[in-house]
Image (tube, rainbow, N blue to C red):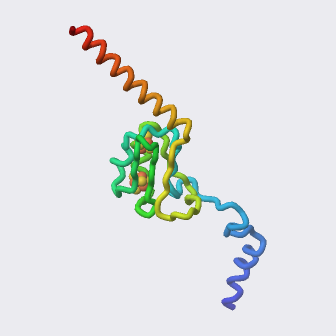
């Protein structure tokens, strides 16, 4: 008689949709608030390292001159502190896992050559203007 108790459940499951997903034959669907990985829009990064200072695990490295941003995926716990601190809003928490790569541990992002070139020209312009201002000041003192 105990078997009879399962019949309604068995019939219900027989005519309802599966609760499992079709992954990997269908794209994986992540919950809206899932903490998958940290992503960066590297060309918007100004390289001041607020994210580096905010990270409690030391998972980030930034090189302003080289235009690089690196994350150690094994150290990152996706707490989101770096995302909160980024003044340019170029960091975000993505729901899905990162794309598989040859290096599982570290992911290095580098700015595009156009952005690096524009930044280099900007730096040269600042140095040139500073030199001109210094020269003008020296000439004025003579
Ligand atoms: S999400 Fe948290 S642990 Fe990961 S890099 Fe940002 S601050 Fe560090
Ligand atoms: S806080 Fe944002 S803008 Fe600053 S270095 Fe980090 S990613 Fe770049």
Whether residue 141 can be seen here: yes
User: In front here: 76 or 108?
Assistant: 108
Residue 120, image x, y percentages: 46, 33
- Residue that appears at 25% across and 8% down: 140
Residue 104, image x, y percentages: 51, 65
- Residue that appears at 66% across and 89% down: 2
Q: Check the image and report above or below for 74 versus 128.
A: below
- Residue that appears at 27% across and 13% down: 137
Residue 121, image x, y percentages: 47, 29
User: In front here: 60 or 4?
Assistant: 60
- Residue 9 lies in quadrant: bottom right
Residue 40, image x, y percentages: 51, 47
- From the viewer's perspective, is 15 left or right of 44? right
Whether residue 79 can be seen here: no
Residue with the most extreme left position: 142
Total numbered labels: 0
- Residue that appears at 69% across and 88% down: 3
Q: For ligand 1, give the image quadrant.
A: bottom left
Q: Which quadrant does the C terminus fall into?
A: top left
Q: Check the image and report above or below for 5 versus 38.
A: below
Q: Which quadrant does the N terminus fall into?
A: bottom right
User: In front here: 92 or 42?
Assistant: 42
């Amino acid at each position: 008689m105990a078997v009879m108790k399962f019949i309604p459940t068995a019939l219900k499951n027989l005519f309802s949709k599966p609760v499992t997903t079709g992954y990997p034959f269908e794209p994986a669907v992540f919950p809206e608030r899932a903490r998958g990985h940290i992503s960066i829009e590297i060309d918007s990064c100004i390289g001041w390292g607020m994210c580096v200072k905010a990270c409690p695990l030391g998972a980030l490295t930034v090189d302003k001159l080289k235009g690089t941003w690196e994350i150690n995926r094994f150290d990152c716990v996706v707490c989101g502190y770096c995302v909160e601190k980024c003044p340019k809003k170029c960091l975000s928490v993505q729901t899905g896992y990162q794309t598989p790569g040859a290096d599982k541990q570290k992911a290095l992002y580098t700015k595009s050559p156009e952005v690096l070139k524009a930044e280099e020209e900007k730096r040269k312009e600042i140095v040139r203007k500073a030199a001109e201002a210094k020269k003008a000041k020296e000439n004025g003192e003579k």
